[in-house]
Image (spheres, rainbow, N blue to C red):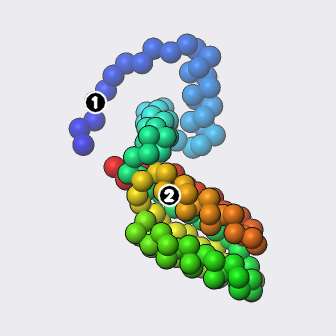
Amino acid sequence: MKVKRFGVSIEENLLIKLDALVKKQKFPNRSQAIRFLIQEKLVEEEWDKDREVAGAIVLVYDHHKRELQKKSTTLQHDYFDLILSVQHVHLDHNNCLETIAVKGKARKLKELADKLIAIKGIKHGELVMSTAS
Ligand code: NI
């Protein structure tokens, strides 16, 4: 994609804050930080407007809880058309980390994530909202 340059005028204190962000998040330069912030805002809008989006649902749970796995599998089959892939990692003797890559309407993805994260026994769950475009 063609890269265009443009001048940006901002207040000094805001520029100081931008530079602090560049340093903190280890962006290579200001341009990359600004690109990131714009993209983040656009992704937020896509999700708000129920557009076709992509993301990942991350779950950590104890695999000894049989009911939990059953419920999770049933839910994943109910929403199979949204799921691209499921990666299961055995973290240690008890804990499993599952990363479910999803694509579809934002509202449906949120609905699935909410249901999975709410299953009794899930230690940690999070929906990573990204973009399909
Ligand atoms: Ni496991």
In the depicted view, which residue is nearer to us: 4 or 112? Answer: 112
111, above or below 30, in the image: below
Q: Which residue is denoted by mark 2 in the rendering?
A: 109
**Which is nearer the N-term, disc 2 or disc 1?**
1
Residue at the spot x=57%, y=43% of the render? 26
Left or right: where does residue 124 sit relative to residue 131?
A: right
Residue 49 in picture, x, y percent from top left? 44, 40
Residue 44 in picture, x, y percent from top left? 49, 40
Examine the image and state in which quarter residue 116 appears: bottom right
Name the secondary structure under disc 1: loop
Name the secondary structure under disc 2: helix
Left or right: where does residue 76 sit relative to residue 116?
A: left
In the depicted view, which residue is nearer to us: 91 or 72? Answer: 72
Residue at the spot x=71%, y=86% of the render? 66
Left or right: where does residue 4 sit relative to residue 125?
A: left
Residue at the spot x=52%, y=61% of the render? 56
73, above or below 100, in the image: below
Q: Quadrant of the N terminus?
A: top left
Residue type beneath disc 1: Lys
78, above or below 12, in the image: below
Alpha carbon separation for disc pair 2 and 1: 34 Å
Residue 79 in picture, x, y percent from top left? 47, 69
Residue 88 in picture, x, y percent from top left? 57, 79
Residue furthest to the front in view is: 78
Judge whether residue 130 can be spotted in this image.
Answer: no
Residue type beneath disc 2: Leu
Residue at the spot x=58%, y=14% of the render? 12
Q: Which residue is denoted by mark 1 in the rendering?
A: 4
